[in-house]
Image (cartoon, grey):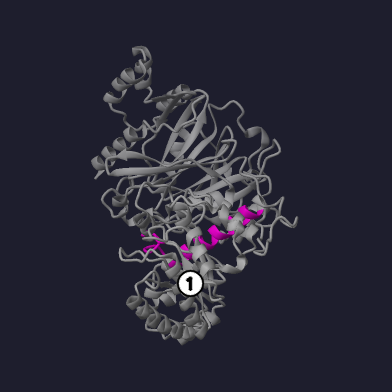
């Protein structure tokens, strides 16, 4: 499948965009007019540069107000088309995107439009180019892909075809099933964009909220499957208008874009598996599969990196963890309780490859700790690693001595190290022996039984990238996002989870103000939620050992009586043990929070059939953390 991306998707100069697109591994690129106009590089030089980078220049766009015009305006459009044809010859680009007219003065006459398209085709033939006519969802008269295609057929010119854009089709409520019946020779170009479902006018929706495939709510697998059935064999390109993308690092956005196309290619091939090679499809796109994996079956470990080992290990001890041992060749420890394994390493300054908060701005605590690595149990770790690198993820460098268990990992978009471990066969993971942990040292009756979920924070410009990463690399599904109010703004939360709920990974987008320093370090700290079957006893033990709980206000406990009708004895015990309470249609939820250590805090949870994450209690926590941080500064 020939992959392409429009320069409008990316930040930076045209020259920087070409470098990033090539580095990410795309086959080609669409040149957006504005990017060329503001560039000091001559078209001939850009053509040569793209060739040196191994990129084809697949499309030049857009040609606006070129059709559906009165005679005088159309004559000027032909003049502009001649000039554009000359330019494309210098660029070496063969296909021009022609948009349907959005002017109130656009002519609503299909016969006239077909005639104008034919005449434009004659000009295109003179210059050796092709015209791909696209119906914009907000076009005055031509705003549906079927309508545009009928006009192309009526124009009956070999240099005039259709451009299909998934956003314009799906945002307008169009039915993509007609794509299967289109002559693939008349489909000149295909652009893909996903988007969250929103109640906006199509223009605003399109200009600000498009995202890469897999990051929104559109069914792009269905669109791709219909393209395959049609026999289309041209470029599959991304055209994304998104405010965040235009401000983000150009290289990582390009990698994210190609990841989305490779993931979509794999999903489409899987959906069409019964048809491919059967003659029911004209599968000329030659879809390539990714290494197949199953979603994680559980948590292997969570790694904390800290600049204050004493504070971090004291927190673990007060929660009931015991030191399993020190690694024989690395400066790391492992702490154990139930099936929960917390690896602790000591580091100075910034601990992440791309820390979400500048260590120089941390003022909420004297120690710095954060979630730096996540280990997952998978049935085929090797395939998971191959899949992740095929999707553009950079491997984490890791030195291993002879006899040490191989552990392969990649960087997540937020800088977290993601490791792939084997599904245990009932015994302890092989890597634990490197810490000197004996099999009989593993607890089977511990109060904390394992890891319930891990909550990781995302930077605002890479939130969608994180969702796609965990979807495509680990096969996790996503739940609808919800907003949680806090003292510094709304926190957007979206839970990634395995089909059997063995792995739950909430991704949280902290308020933008936090990134600008007004509430740094605590706007949305990350946390590890530990599972227990008796959270009351965990809390009692923690109190005895001197744990600093997050202080919960009395008003919260009074509200529990109002919300749930709890008796005073129950509420009194909750208050005494610093516990919070929630309930849904499936059962009850008891939990407590520790105070924040750097950018991390711990939560211990007891689920009694409950399936949520205590969203009603999150504002209480955020406010308490805000007060604590304010008191320290």
- Residue found 52% across the figure and 78% down from its top: 94
Say if the magenta span includes residue 249: yes
Magenta region, residue range: 241-269
Label 1, residues with CA under 10 Å away: few <14, some 14-19, many ≥20: many
Residue at image point 38% right, 53% down: 460
Q: In the picture shown, does residue 597 fall above or below 91? A: above
Q: Position of residue 619 (x, y in %)?
A: 33, 35
**Taking 578 as reference, is 555 left or right?**
left
Name the residue rendered at 50%, 85% in the picture: 126
Is disc 1 placed on a helix, strand or loop? Answer: strand
Q: Does 252 appear in magenta?
A: yes
User: Could one spot residue 60 in this view of the protein?
Assistant: no
* Quadrant location of the N terminus in the rendered image: bottom right
Q: Nearer the viewer, residue 471 or 242?
A: 242
> On the rendered structure, is 475 left or right of 215?
right
Q: Between 293 and 438, which is closer to the camera in this rendering?
A: 293
Q: Position of residue 220 (x, y in %)?
A: 54, 53
Query: Relative to 269, does residue 69 appear above or below in the rendering?
Result: below
Magenta stretch: dominant SS?
helix
Q: Is residue 559 left or right of residue 236?
A: left
Q: Residue furthest right?
A: 278
Q: Position of residue 129 (x, y in %)?
A: 52, 80
Q: Determine which quarter of the picture holds residue 202.
A: bottom left
Placement of the C terminus among the 4 image quadrants? top left
Nearest to the observer: residue 441 or residue 611: 611
Q: Residue at x 28, y 48 (%)?
A: 519
User: Where does residue 526 sit, x and y in percent of width and height?
Assistant: 42, 44
Report the number of discs. Answer: 1
Residue linked to disc 1: 30
Using the rendered image of the protein, determine whether residue 337 is visible from the camera's viewpoint.
yes
């Amino acid at each position: 499948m020939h992959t392409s991306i429009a320069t409008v998707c990316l930040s930076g100069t045209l020259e920087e965009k070409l470098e990033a697109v090539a580095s990410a591994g795309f086959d080609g690129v669409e040149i957006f007019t504005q990017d060329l106009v503001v560039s000091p590089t001559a078209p001939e030089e850009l053509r040569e540069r793209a060739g040196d980078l191994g990129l084809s220049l697949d499309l030049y766009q857009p040609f606006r107000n070129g059709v559906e015009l009165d005679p005088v305006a159309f004559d000027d459009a032909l003049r502009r088309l001649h000039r554009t044809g000359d330019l494309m010859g210098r660029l070496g680009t063969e296909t021009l995107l022609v948009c349907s007219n959005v002017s109130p003065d656009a002519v609503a006459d299909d016969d006239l439009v077909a005639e104008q398209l034919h005449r434009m085709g004659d000009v295109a033939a003179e210059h050796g180019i092709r015209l791909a006519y696209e119906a914009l969802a907000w076009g005055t008269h031509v705003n549906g892909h079927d309508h545009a295609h009928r006009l192309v057929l009526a124009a009956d010119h070999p240099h005039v075809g259709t451009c299909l854009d998934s956003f314009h089709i799906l945002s307008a409520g169009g039915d993509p099933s007609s794509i299967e019946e289109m002559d693939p020779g008349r489909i000149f170009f295909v652009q893909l964009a996903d988007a969250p479902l929103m109640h906006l006018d199509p223009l605003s929706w399109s200009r600000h909220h498009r995202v890469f495939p897999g990051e929104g709510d559109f069914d792009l697998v269905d669109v791709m499957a219909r393209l395959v059935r049609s026999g289309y064999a041209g470029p599959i390109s991304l055209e994304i208008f998104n405010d965040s993308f235009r401000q983000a690092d150009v290289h990582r956005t390009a990698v994210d874009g190609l990841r989305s196309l490779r993931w979509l290619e794999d999903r489409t091939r899987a959906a069409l598996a019964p048809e491919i090679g059967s003659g029911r499809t004209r599968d000329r796109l030659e879809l390539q599969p990714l290494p197949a994996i199953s979603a994680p079956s559980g948590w292997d470990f969570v790694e904390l990196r800290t600049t204050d080992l004493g504070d971090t290990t004291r927190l673990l001890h007060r929660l009931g963890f015991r030191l399993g041992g020190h690694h024989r060749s690395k400066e790391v420890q492992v702490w154990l309780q139930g099936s929960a394994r917390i690896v602790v390493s000591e580091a100075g300054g910034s601990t992440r490859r791309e820390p979400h908060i500048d260590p120089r701005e941390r003022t909420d605590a004297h120690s710095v700790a954060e979630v730096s690595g996540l280990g997952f149990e998978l049935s085929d770790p090797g395939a998971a690693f191959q899949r992740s690198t095929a999707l553009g993820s950079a491997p984490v460098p890791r030195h291993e001595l002879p006899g040490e268990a191989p552990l392969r990992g990649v960087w997540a978009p937020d800088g977290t190290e993601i490791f792939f471990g084997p599904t245990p066969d009932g015994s302890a993971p092989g890597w634990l022996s490197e810490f000197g942990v004996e099999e009989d040292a593993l607890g089977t009756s511990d109060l904390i039984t394992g890891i319930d979920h891990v909550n990781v924070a995302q930077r605002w410009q890479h939130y969608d990238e994180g969702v796609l990463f965990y979807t495509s690399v680990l096969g996790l599904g996503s739940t609808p996002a919800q907003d949680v109010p806090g003292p510094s703004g709304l926190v957007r939360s979206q839970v990634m989870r395995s089909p059997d709920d063995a792995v739950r990974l909430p991704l949280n987008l902290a308020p933008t103000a936090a990134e600008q320093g007004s509430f740094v370090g605590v706007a949305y700290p990350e946390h590890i939620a530990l599972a227990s079957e008796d959270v009351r006893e965990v809390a009692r033990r923690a109190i005895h050992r001197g744990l600093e709980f997050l202080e919960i206000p009395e008003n919260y406990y009074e509200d529990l009586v109002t919300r749930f009708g709890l008796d005073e004895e129950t509420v009194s015990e909750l208050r005494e043990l610093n516990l919070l309470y929630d309930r849904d249609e499936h059962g009850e939820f008891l939990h407590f929070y520790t105070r924040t250590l750097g950018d991390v805090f711990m939560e211990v949870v007891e689920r009694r059939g409950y399936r949520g994450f205590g969203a009603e209690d999150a504002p209480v926590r955020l406010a308490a953390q805000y007060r604590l941080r304010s008191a320290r500064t």
